[in-house]
Amino acid sequence: QVQLVESGGGLAQAGGSLRLSCVGSGFIFSPDAMGWYRQAPGNQRELVASITGGGRANYANSVKGRFTISRDNSRNSVSLQMNTLLPEDTAVYYCNADSHSGYRYWGQGTQVTVSS
């Protein structure tokens, strides 16, 4: 059974930093793309950043230059370093992993709150 377990959310002040981590288990093969989405109250879930198995990263325009995604294929893990946080970064952040068959797995979500 595949599981994604996130950690690292919490409260930060504007301009501060947080690091999110997500470790996957139960994968037969290393996932294809992994990444992070977020959902703020009243909003749709949106892509924050994704990274392929080869290390190619993609970012939402709103986080470019502030957030960095990284991945450890040996641990099926993905991390998100978030710097220069803004109040509008407040959301529940979800880790995702895409299997080679195209199925998307989700973590349980971790709350990030940025105070002004």
Image (cartoon, rainbow, N blue to C red):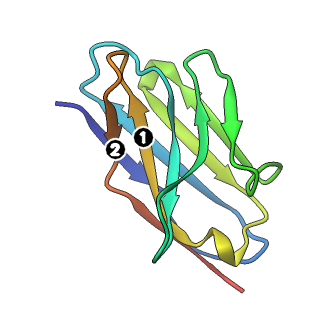
At numbered mark 2, what does the secondary structure look like: helix, strand or loop?
A: strand
Q: Residue at x 51, y 58 (%)?
A: 38
Give yes or no for contact between labels 2 and 1 (Cβ–Cβ under 8 Å): yes
- Image quadrant for the C terminus? bottom right
Vertical relation: 106 (above or below) 17: above
Q: Residue at x 34, y 44 (%)?
A: 106
Few, some or many residues within 10 Å of mark 1 (<14, 14–19, 20+): many
At numbered mark 1, what does the secondary structure look like: helix, strand or loop?
A: strand
Q: Amino acid at mark 2?
A: Trp
Snapshot quadrant of residue 71? top right
The residue nearer to you, when weighing 9 against 61, is 61
Res. 106 mark: 2
How many marks do you count on the picture? 2
The residue nearer to you, when weighing 99 against 112, is 99
Res. 32 mark: none
Vertical relation: 20 (above or below) 105: below
The residue nearer to you, when weighing 75 against 93, is 93
State left or right for residue 9 relative to residue 31: right
Q: Mark 1 = which residue? A: 96
